[in-house]
Amino acid sequence: MEDILTHEGEADERREKFQAFIDERNFREAKNFLSTLNVVDIANLIDGLDPQTGVALYRMLPKDVAAEVFAKFDPEQQEAIIYASTDTEIRELIEDMFLDDTVDLLEEMPSGVVSRILENTGHSDRSMINQLLKYPDSSAGSIMTTEYISLKKEMTVSSAIDKIKREGIQSETIYILYVTDENRILEGILSLRDLIVADDSKRVGELMREDVIYAYTLDDKEEVANIFKKYSFEALPIVDQEKRIVGIVTVDDILDVIEEEVTEDFQIMAATTPTDKPYLETGIFALSKHRILWLLILMISATITQKIIYNYENILQNVTFLSGFIPMLMDTGGNSGSQSSTLIIRGLATGDIKSRDWYRVVFKEVRVAMVCGLALAVINYFKIYLDGIPSNVALVVSLTLVCAVMIAKIVGAILPMVAIKIKVDPAIMASPLITTIADALSLMVYFIIARNIMSI
């Protein structure tokens, strides 16, 4: 936490210094200051300016830096720069950008801007961009780049290094190299390090590894992210059904996928419809639209508890003490279910838990529920008894607590795993839905125990 605060403090100090140059209209010093920073920090500082000033400063950046900075801008800043650029400038910008960054740009821009960009893109690049745009948004093909270096088995180390020198500037990464045959069938991989330390006369085929891990173009990008997490890759080859390599996915693209997935899960778990638009840039009505459907569903489902209370109204009339404990029992059950579901959903996301492990998960949650439920029940019994409430009421509430915690934890563990089985995002089976189910079951148990113990 201290490191994060230190980093944020440095960022604030940088921004204040940069803003002082802008306020003084001292663009020369602002440019010199930007030249000392990395591309991400440059993009963040320029993004904070009004579009006109941002465009002016962007045009002052060195050509070899400008394309990388542009790829890091927010869509609004990118759009402003495109509108302010000549056709020649756009052409040079697109030529300097990696294809996957260009595809990301086109997906965010209005149709008018997209048309202008494509008009100033070379024929071969435009053909490749159109191909990438046709892949489903959730697929590996949609996030891959076609800019990689491929080698042949018969090439010597010397000729391979010459090729890397010629083509490396146009490739997204040169640290991992791919060996293909004349039909682009993926045959092996090797690292740049393996190539550099090898004898110049050695053949690529002697150095390559044949046990290549790859993904298909239509594989879900979340599955690709899991491969990266499992093997700590820097890049992963993407092939078609004939095992012809068509592109690679790099780790920077996967970090974006992981961030999107985590954000989406948080939104679903909070019972809102996922959206990729930043919170502060989303209108009130748009936010309301994303939330109201879930709120409506949960409100209607909550009427189940109302019907249960109505059916057992005679018990509440005879023992009025019981009604006062309903909120506590429901909250405890809901919190218990949330604890379990959060851990299970996270375990499913990281691969620590598989759907086939359901019986182990349930068995463990039952034991945890027994420990937690009994501890809460004992404390609750003595608290209620010391408050002067009859001991039979204290017993009913305490027994219900054990059952409520047990029910909620089992439901919280099972529902996410059921979601995986029926191919639904397990985050949907999160706090609000589990709370509603656990509340209804806990209330039924409460009244059944009360009726039997108190003979109502």
Image: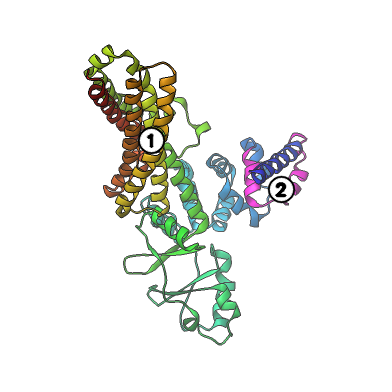
Mark 2: secondary structure:
helix
**Front-most of residues 173 and 359:** 359
Residue 90 belongs to the span the image colors magenta: no
Q: Residue at x 55, y 75 (%)?
A: 163
The amino acid beneath tag 1 is: Gly
Answer above or below: position of 163 versus 219: below
Q: Quadrant of residue 80?
A: top right
Q: Residue at x 44, y 20 (%)?
A: 386
Q: Main secondary structure of the magenta part?
A: helix
Near mark 2 (Cα within 10 A), the count class, few <14, some 14-19 or many ≥20, is many
The amino acid beneath tag 2 is: Leu
Give the position of the N terminus as an image quadrant. Answer: top right
Answer above or below: position of 76 versus 217: above
The residue carrying mark 1 is 373
Mark 1: secondary structure:
helix
Residue 290 seen from this side:
no
**Front-most of residues 113 and 319:** 319
The residue carrying mark 2 is 34
State the separation of the CA atoms marked 1 and 2. 58 Å
